[in-house]
Image (cartoon, grey):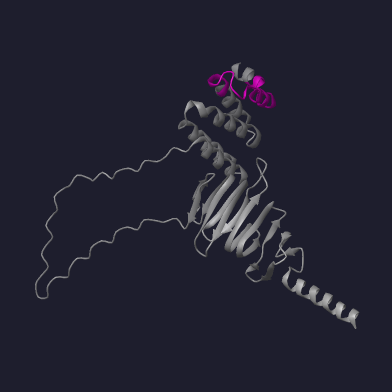
Amino acid sequence: MFWGLAASAVALAFAVFFMRAPSARSLGGLEVARASVDLMAREDAAGVMIEGGEAALMDVARGITLRNQGPLVVRREPSGVRLVHGRAEFSVNHRQPGAPPAVVLVSGGAIEVMGTRFTVEERGGEGTVTLHEGAIAFRGLSGAVVPVGVGQTLAWPVAVPSEPALPESAPPESGRPAPLAAPSPKLAPTRVPSTPVRTPSAEDVLRELEVLRGRHEFEQAARYLEEAMRKQPVATRERLSFELGSLLTYQLKDARRACSHWARHEQQFQRGHYAEAVQRARGTLACEGRDRESAR
C-alpha cells in the first residue's frame, strides 16, 4: 500500500513538472539555454509565448540571445528575431568586419546589431530600445537610419510635426457676388530660422560605418567616410582616413583609388598611429610599382 502511494505521488509530481516546463529544448526555432523552474511557455501562431517565469532563448545561427523581463511574445523570422510584444534584454555576439549585422525586428522597424547588449520594449505599434554596450542602429520603416549611442534610449514611432491646416474662406452671402480679390502687396520672403545640425562625432561615424559594412554596402560606406572626414577635426580625421583606406584596400579592392588615398594619408599624417598598417596595405597593393609606372 505504502509503495503504491509513493509511486503515485512521484508520477503526479512528474506530470505537474512537465505541464509547467517546456516540453523540448527548442521553442519556435529558438534554443532554450536556461529556464526557471516556474517557466510557463508555449508556441502558437504568433510565436513563442512566455506567460510566467524566466528563460534565455537563443537564435544560435545568428548569435542572438534574449532574456525575457516579464510576459512576452517573440518569433523567429527569416530576416531576424521579432519581438512581438513585451520586454527583453538582448545580447548579440560580436560580428567580424564585413559580416552582416544581426537584426531584431520591432513594430517601428529593425534594430541592426554588430555585437552588443541592449533592452527592447515592444508595446504594439510603439516601443523603445536602450543600448547598454556596443553599437546598434535603428532602421525605421521609411528606411532612415538612426545610430543609438551607449546609454541612449530611442523610441518609435518617431513623431512627425503636422502642418497647420489652412483657414477655410467663408462662403459669399447669397444674392451678392463675391468681391474680386485685391492683389496682395509683394512681400519679402520670410526667412525660416535654420535648425542647427549637430556634426556627428567620430564614434557616430564609426558606428554607421560598421552598419554599412555589415550590409556589404562598401561603396556607400566609402562615400560616407569621404564626406564625414571633411567635417571632423584634425585630431579624429586620421582614424577615419585609415578606415577609408582599409575599405578601399580590403573590401572594394580598388588598387588605384587605395594607393592614391594611402599616398595622401602618409603625406598628411607623417609618423601617424597606423604607419605600419599603412605600409602593409601598400605592400599588398604593390603601390610602389604602380607609382613607378605612373611616373614614366
Q: Position of residue 80 (x, y in %)?
A: 64, 57
Is residue 50 visible to us here? no
**What span is colored magenta in the figure?**
265-290
Q: Which residue is pictured at 61% across the width and 53% down the height?
A: 103
Asked if residue 287 lies in the magenta stretch, the reply is yes
Q: Is residue 260 above or below residue 224?
A: above
What type of secondary structure mainly makes up the magenta span? Answer: helix
Q: Nearer the viewer, residue 169 or 233?
A: 233
Q: Quadrant of residue 213?
A: top right
Q: Say whether residue 22 is left or right of residue 73.
A: right
Residue displayed at 25% across by 61% down? 166
Q: Write down the quadrant of residue 207 in the picture.
A: top right
How far across and how far down the image is residue 203, in percent?
53, 37
Quarter placement of the C terminus: top right
Q: Is residue 37 magenta?
A: no
Q: Position of residue 251 (x, y in %)?
A: 64, 37
